[in-house]
Each structure stands twice: as structure tokens, then as C-alpha cells.
Image (cartoon, rainbow, N blue to C red):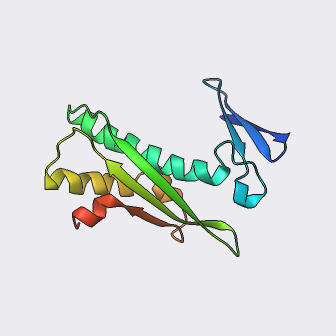
């Protein structure tokens, strides 16, 4: 088995995660509402972060193929938890495209590309994904 990531439990509800190819690290901590200190990303924070990062990446790939360089895109992400069982109930992503200018047609493409990113395709359909893209333009 070829390993991509190595994760070690370091105690006190924390893990240390190493991306083996690059040697970069991420530490996780349990959230304050689940016995942790909330001093690092929680594992469920990383799921929400991965979703938004994936959306931005595939949007970037789409526009780079068209020779358009995107810049200064900012997103705010909210993860909403449910209980019984404890799980992610909803991920809300607000896109701020800054100085980038898009037509209505391009926004529709952005919405479609974002909605079909690999992370979105991997998440359970029980997790509601809400973005501000759909509220402005109906597909």
C-alpha cells in the first residue's frame, strides 16, 4: 500500500497529520463543544475546508483552461453540526469574487463546476451544501 498521509494521535484529543510527499503538517483538535480545546481545525472543520478548497480549485482549473487567471477570491465557510448522531448537517459557503467580473452565464458555469467537485461528489447526500451562487442565479 502506498501511503499519502500519515496521522498520529498525540494525546489530549489531538492528531498530527503529515502529507508525505510535501512534508507539510496539519494538527487537529477536538472542538470545544466536543471535549476539546478548539485550538486547531477539528476533523469536521477540515471536511468543510476541503469542500471549499476543492470548489475553488476546480473553478480555477476551469478558468485556467480558458486562459483566464482568477485572483483575490475569498470564501467564508460555516459548518453546522447536528446531534444524535453527531455529524455535519450543513456546510454554508459564501463566495466573494472580489475584482473578478463574470457574466451570468459564467456564474452558472462556476456553480455547476463547484457543485460537482470531487469532494462534493464524495460527501453524503445527507449533508446540505449551501452556497451564495445558487441564490443569485438559477440553473
Q: Nearer the viewer, residue 58 or 83?
A: 83
Where does the N terminus fall, quadrant-wise?
top right
The residue depicted at 74 percent of the width and 59 percent of the height is 34
Determine whether 70 is above or below 22 in the image.
Answer: below
Q: Nearer the viewer, residue 97 or 115?
A: 97
* Residue 65 in view (yes/no): yes
Determine whether 6 is above or below 91 in the image.
Answer: above
* Residue 81, picture quadrant: bottom right
Spot occupied by residue 9 in the image (x, y as percentages of width and height): 82, 41
Q: Nearer the viewer, residue 67 or 73?
A: 73
The residue depicted at 20 percent of the width and 36 percent of the height is 66
Count of all numbered marks drawn on residues in the image? 0
* Residue 55 in view (yes/no): no
Residue furthest right as drawn? 11
Direction from residue 50 to residue 104 in the image, left or right: left
Where does the C terminus fall, quadrant-wise?
bottom left
* Residue 20, picture quadrant: top right
Direction from residue 78 to residue 116 in the image, left or right: left
Determine whether 139 is above or below 10 in the image.
Answer: below
* Residue 82, picture quadrant: bottom right
Spot occupied by residue 132 in the image (x, y as percentages of width and height): 32, 60
Direction from residue 49 to residue 66 in the image, left or right: left
Amino acid at each position: 500500500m502506498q501511503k499519502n498521509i500519515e496521522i498520529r494521535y498525540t494525546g489530549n484529543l489531538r492528531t498530527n497529520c503529515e502529507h508525505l510527499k510535501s512534508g507539510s503538517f496539519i494538527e487537529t483538535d477536538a472542538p470545544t463543544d466536543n471535549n476539546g480545546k478548539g485550538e486547531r481545525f477539528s476533523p469536521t472543520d477540515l471536511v468543510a475546508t476541503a469542500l471549499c478548497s476543492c470548489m475553488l480549485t476546480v473553478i480555477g482549473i476551469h478558468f485556467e483552461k480558458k486562459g483566464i487567471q482568477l485572483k483575490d477570491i475569498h470564501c467564508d465557510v460555516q459548518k453546522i453540526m447536528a446531534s444524535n448522531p453527531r455529524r455535519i448537517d450543513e456546510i454554508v459557503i459564501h463566495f466573494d469574487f472580489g475584482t473578478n467580473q463574470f457574466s451570468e452565464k459564467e456564474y452558472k458555469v462556476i456553480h455547476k463546476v463547484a457543485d460537482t467537485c470531487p469532494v462534493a461528489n464524495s460527501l453524503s447526500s445527507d449533508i446540505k451544501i449551501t452556497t451564495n451562487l445558487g441564490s443569485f442565479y438559477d440553473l
